Image (tube, helix red, strand yellow):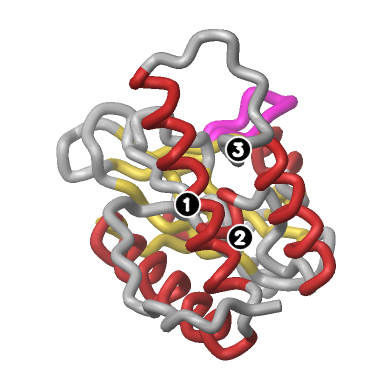
Amino acid sequence: MTSSSPISLHTTFHSCDLSSSKHREMPPDKNANHQQTHYEVLKVKEDANYEEIRASYRSALLSLHPDKLLITSETSNSNQATGEGFLKVQKAWEILSNSSSRSFYDNELRSSRHDCLAAEVAEDLSLQDMLIQDDGETLELFYQCRCGDYFSVDSMELKKMGYSLLREASGIRALNADTLPGSVILPCGSCSLKALLLINIDDS
């Protein structure tokens, strides 16, 4: 069960992790300075139930606890890494095993992601804002960034995310596989700015 020691709810998110948000990023930002969430530390999904979290916590303890490790080389570096990993697992368990602290953490995580998204996104775009290039098989969508390069995505990439594009006389329309509107984060080809392409099934 939960620890009787005080639980610190203050969490600082030093990097913008959008990978688990409802926004879909295309392509992944390979240069992102990613900091693990408590869910990632315990290797569980963010909608995991208590039993799943507890099982992952126990598994992590078996792999990280100093008394359980089978280490042939007892260097200071390996001991330090083991200690840091153990503390991360303990912290994650303290937060996620308690319904109140987990709810607080989830709200903080969502808020951090929203702030990061707002800070990174330079443009909010709709399908009707995009320039279209049709090669007969694939639709290429472009929008010029302030740096002179372009935000871009093609119909094949969108299809992998569950969106099919339909070309019409008045423009393009998105057919969403789950019938819900969504958004895709498009990085600029040259600079660090990003655009948020809002995809609504009512676009025409």
The question of residue 139 being in magenta is answered with yes
Left or right, 146 with reference to 38: left
Circles 3 and 2, Cβ within 8 Å, touching? The answer is no
Residue at image mark 3: 64
Classify residue 94 by image quadrant. bottom right
Residue at image mark 2: 170
Circles 3 and 1, Cβ within 8 Å, touching? The answer is no
Name the image quarter holding the C terminus: bottom right
How many numbered marks are there?
3
- Residue at 53% x, 73% y: name it: 95
Q: Position of residue 66 (x, y in %)?
A: 56, 35
Q: Residues within 10 Å of mark 3 (few under 14, many from 20)?
A: many
Judge whether residue 166 can be spotted in this image.
Answer: no
Mark 1 belongs to which amino acid?
Lys
Name the image quarter holding the N terminus: bottom right
Q: Residues within 10 Å of mark 2 (few under 14, many from 20)?
A: few
Q: Which residues are magenta?
A: 132-140
Left or right, 39 with reference to 177: left
Mark 3 belongs to which amino acid?
Leu
Q: Residue furthest top?
A: 73
Q: Nearer the viewer, residue 55 or 38?
A: 55
Q: Residue furthest bottom?
A: 100
Residue at image mark 1: 88
- Residue at 35% x, 53% y: name it: 16
- For mark 1, give the secondary structure: helix
